[in-house]
Image: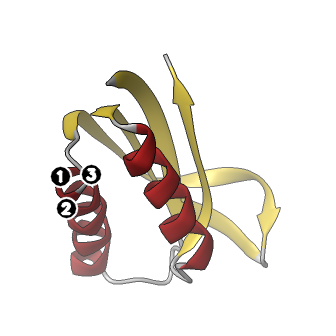
Amino acid sequence: MKQYKGMFIIRPTLAEEAYKQVIADFAKLFEDNESRILEVNEWGMKELAYEIEDFKKGYYVVFVVEATPQAVAEYNRVCNIREDLLRHIIVAE
């Protein structure tokens, strides 16, 4: 397994509990794919560098994970279909 660093930005229109649920959903996604999360940093609500879908702010979450290639592929697939995310990225360290 490789170590990866990732980030996703959640839409600012969600409730505080919804942010926690999104983070928990991704933790479960990695655990279900035989991977483990090493670190999660919630940066919170920040200004975006440019508007995305008419939003000027977003809730940033940065994480470090030790993951299988299947887990990374599943993360990208899920991020592309979730409507509560503005952007996402994951890169090998």
Q: Where does residue 1 sit, x and y in percent of width and height?
A: 32, 24
Between the C-alphas of marks 1 and 2, the distance is 5 Å
The residue located at (45%, 59%) in the rendering is 74
Is there CB contact under 8 Å for labels 1 and 3? yes
The residue located at (58%, 78%) in the rendering is 81
Q: Amino acid at mark 2?
A: Lys
Query: Is 91 located above or below residue 33 in the figure?
Result: above
Q: Name the one closer to the observer, 54 or 61.
A: 61
Q: Which residue is mark 1?
A: 31
Q: Where does residue 45 sit, x and y in percent of width and height?
A: 46, 57
Is there CB contact under 8 Å for labels 2 and 3? yes
Task: From the viewer's perspective, tell me whether residue 26 is left or right of residue 50.
Answer: left
Between the C-alphas of marks 1 and 3, the distance is 4 Å
Q: Name the one closer to the observer, 21 or 31.
A: 31
**Rendered image: mark on residue 41:** none
Q: Tell me the SS state at disc 1.
A: helix
Q: Tell me the SS state at disc 3.
A: helix
Residue 71 can be seen in this image:
yes
Q: Amino acid at mark 1?
A: Glu
Q: Tell me the SS state at disc 2.
A: helix
Between the C-alphas of marks 2 and 3, the distance is 5 Å
Q: Quadrant of residue 69?
A: top left
**Rendered image: mark on residue 30:** 3
Q: Which residue is mark 2?
A: 28
The residue located at (78%, 77%) in the rendering is 53
Query: Is 73 located above or below residue 7 in the figure?
Result: below
Query: Is 75 located above or below residue 72 in the figure?
Result: below
Q: Where does residue 51 sit, x and y in percent of width and height?
A: 80, 64
Q: Where does residue 31 sit, x and y in percent of width and height?
A: 17, 52
